[in-house]
Image: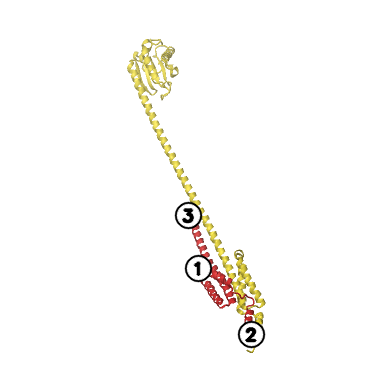
Amino acid sequence: MIRKTLVPLAVLALAACATTDPPEREMGAARAMVSQARPVAAQDAPQQLAEAQQKLTRAEAAMQRGHYEHARILAEQAEADAKLAWTVAQNVRVQRSAAEVQDGTRALREEMERKGR
Amino acid sequence: MRFNPKLTVLASLVACACATISPQANQQLEEARAAYRAAAADPAVQASAAAELKSAQDALQDAERMAEKGEPSELIEHNAYLAEQRSRIALRTADIRRSEASIAAAGEERRRLQLEAREREAAAAREQAQQAQMQAQQSELARKEAESRASQLENARIETEKQSTARAELGAELKRLESELADMRAKQTDRGWILTLKNELLFDAGGATLKPGAQRALDNLAQFLTKYPDRDIAIEGFTDSTGTKELNQQLSEKRAWSVKAALVARGIQSTRIDARGYGPSFPVASNETPTGRQLNRRVEIVIDPSSASGGSSRK
């Protein structure tokens, strides 16, 4: 009897610092961030996106099994990975645009200098 | 089971509280600290990714606190991981802001350059227009000048033509006078046209009173002067050399004045007529023969003496 009640207690004790409720909020944030990152990062940050995707999948599986603490950790990491993927991809894009605009401006300036002479 | 379940639980709790941090968690914590330091050191991150940096800091502080308290490595590693990722996100976000700023700056420069280019084009167009206007003005000026030169030439030509026509008319008129009066000669000299009248036609010998027979010649002369109101005349009296010079001089003057008076009486303005006597000076023939003397006794009417090349008076 005692043993049967004590084993779950031990598990609870291990997860002492965390909640035992399903981490719905964290899961939702992770799903949203992965969705947001996917179209942007697929091309320009595929590695980070794959990492986030994989962690989200594992979080979903942990949720299914009721391993909420594990799911929470994976969801939080998936969200951070997805956000990093999005940011990296966004950075690549903006840098590309900046280079294009600067090239255009340089060409314009050179043309004007030629004309000006 | 040989172990007391109670003890197992206790052991678990102790393990939880006093667990040494796993090497993975330790390494993750190191990486998180380094990533956070890098992000916090970037002023652009402070300026444009402050929220992300703060969440990285929160996660790192959680991880540090957990490590101090000896909480499970899994949780320490998790928070350290979050801190590292968020630090990287903060750095990348700052990069994005930098790139966006450079795009804005490049766009601004492009607008400035385009404006400058438009201004230059406008200035060039203005200059071209000015040059075209100046050229047009110059060619208009040249055209007007040529026109006025041509019209001056034409006027001069017309004037010359008029003058020569007038001269021809004058000559014809004088020739007509000559043909009508048997004792008058018309002749073109370098002083202009000169009409010569013999004294016998006008005066009795030794006198200065006009004979009735002179009336026709004077009428004709007055008509001529009326017809050419812009022509002045000089009346010059001459004698032969018979008798004293003084008497001859006086006689020639009186005769010239008589002719002038007769013309004035016929309506000719006296200011148009200059009357002088020259006595026996300027003979036109020899005074040795009667015919020569007759030729020298004469009155000359110089037409338009002021316009003649030789001047108004005899030299």
First in sequence: mark 1 or mark 2?
Answer: 2
The residue pinned by badge 1 equals A39
Instruction: Estimate the spatial distance between the alpha carbons at disc 1 and disc 3, rounded to whole Å.
Output: 44 Å
- The residue positioned 38% from the left and 30% from the top of the image is B158
Residue count near mark 3 (Cα–Cα under 10 Å), binned few <14, some 14–19, many ≥20: few
**Chain containing the residue with disc 1:** A
First in sequence: mark 1 or mark 3?
Answer: 1
The residue pinned by badge 3 equals A115
Chain that appears red: A
Q: Is residue B210 left or right of residue B41?
A: left
Location of residue A69 in the rendering, given as x and y in whole percent from the top left corner: 60, 76
Kindly check if marks 1 and 2 are in contact, taking CB atoms under 8 A apart as contact. Answer: no
Tell me the SS state at disc 2.
Answer: helix
The residue pinned by badge 2 equals A3
Q: Nearer the viewer, residue B66 or B94?
A: B66
Coloring applied to the structure:
by chain
Residue count near mark 2 (Cα–Cα under 10 Å), binned few <14, some 14–19, many ≥20: few
Q: Are marks 1 and 2 on the same chain?
A: yes
Kindly check if marks 1 and 3 are in contact, taking CB atoms under 8 A apart as contact. Answer: no
